[in-house]
Image (tube, rainbow, N blue to C red):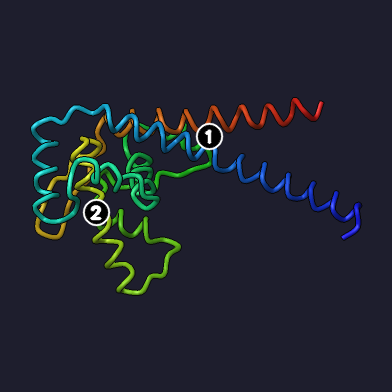
Amino acid sequence: MKVSEKTDQVAVDAFLLATADLLHTPARAFERMMRDQLSNVNLSPAGTTALDRGIANGSFKSLESAKNMLMQPLAQDSMFLIWKSSAFLCDEGLEMAGLARPNQSAELNKNQLVKMVSKGIDSSEGVVQRVSISVSRYLLAMEVFELVRVDKVRTNLLNIVAQPNLDELLRASLSAAGEIFSDQLIGERGNDA
């Protein structure tokens, strides 16, 4: 390899490594803030009951494993969709962000959430069934931390109601990621000047 080719390769490698860091650092900040926020939740009697139910049915083994479950990408997508469907966000804010409320009805139910989470994934019956099982486990873990309240309307209809803890968790976590991302962009623009 010639010196000029080596120099080009070094520049490309440095660019790719910096780009990867630009993508991963805000994600790590989001996850760190989310984990810290969940660690600071004092379980209420309802949260303890949900934890006991989750341990009894094998959804998770402990409080820590319930927290780890919520760190999974599909769980985070579910939380974001529940939050986006909630009254905690105003229509004007969604519109300004170029987003639409994913659920136009007054209440979000588990079947609607599974459909939204499954969008863009293989929609075969087996895959959707596995997503549905995962969403049920995520909802139970969210109940432990009082991020949602799940109201059983009938056997196959569960309404999901976002709680203030979900709003606080996502606002703090997304703000932490947004600040780092913004700082990285400003830093890059400052270096261009």
Question: Would you say residue 141 is visible in this rendering?
Answer: yes
Question: Would you say residue 103 is visible in this rendering?
Answer: no
Compare residues 108 and 49 and report the one nearer the observer: 49
Looking at the image, residue 18 lies above or below residue 73: above
Q: Is residue 127 left or right of residue 139?
A: right
Q: Is residue 12 left or right of residue 98?
A: right
The residue lying at 37 percent from left, 56 percent from top is 117
The residue lying at 28 percent from left, 31 percent from top is 39
**Mark 2 crowd level (few <14, some 14–19, many ≥20, 10 Å Cα):** some
- Residue 163 found in image quarter: top left
Residue bearing the label numbered 2: 110
The image shows residue 76 at horizontal and vertical percentages of 37, 46
Tag 2 near tag 1, CB within 8 Å = no
The image shows residue 40 at horizontal and vertical percentages of 27, 27
**Quadrant the C terminus occupies:** top right
- Residue 129 found in image quarter: bottom left
The image shows residue 13 at horizontal and vertical percentages of 73, 49
* Dot 1: element: helix
What amino acid type is highlighted by mark number 1?
Answer: Met
What amino acid type is highlighted by mark number 2?
Answer: Lys
The image shows residue 171 at horizontal and vertical percentages of 40, 29
Q: Mark 2 or mark 1: which is in front?
A: 2
Residue bearing the label numbered 1: 96
Q: How many marks?
A: 2
The residue lying at 33 percent from left, 60 percent from top is 115
Looking at the image, residue 133 lies above or below residue 100: below
Distance of label 2 from label 1 (alpha carbons):
27 Å
Q: Is residue 83 left or right of residue 161?
A: right
